[in-house]
Amino acid sequence: MADKEFTVADLKKFDGTNGNPAYVAIDDIVYDVTDVDPWAGGKHHGNTAGNNLSEAIMKSPHKKSVLAKLNEVGKLVK
């Protein structure tokens, strides 16, 4: 895993808009979803990149099974 640390404010910058990468946090790990087609434009089924989606992913049909396919870029710190 990457050693980069993200605060909630840092993570907000990675929303997938205006050329920014799209990152999401799940269980305090930050994942890059920039090149994941369903996340085009930083949005996916009402969720927006740049946020902690730990609760939202548990409401999805795939739950956490997709995380293994994503690149970890760092961790979310309080």
Image (cartoon, rainbow, N blue to C red):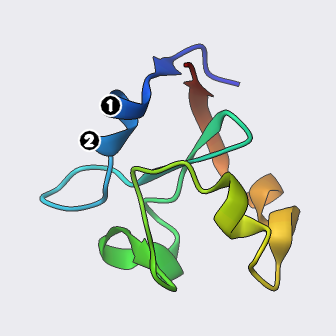
Tell me the number on the disc at residue 13. Answer: 2
> In terms of depth relative to the viewer, which is nearer, 76 or 36?
76
Q: Are marks 2 and 1 in contact (CB under 8 Å)?
A: yes
Where residue 46 appears, x then y in whole percent? 46, 82
Q: Is residue 75 above or below residue 24?
A: above
Mark 2 Cα shell of 10 Å, populated few (<14), some (14-19), many (≥20) = some
Name the kind of residue labelled 1 in the image. Ala
Q: Quadrant of the N terminus?
A: top right
Identified at 51% across, 59% down, the residue is: 33
The number of numbered discs placed on residues in the rendered structure image is: 2
Identified at 39% across, 75% down, the residue is: 43
Identified at 81% across, 85% down, the residue is: 61
Tell me the number on the disc at residue 33. Answer: none
Mark 1 Cα shell of 10 Å, populated few (<14), some (14-19), many (≥20) = few
Q: Quadrant of residue 13?
A: top left
Q: Which residue is mark 1?
A: 9
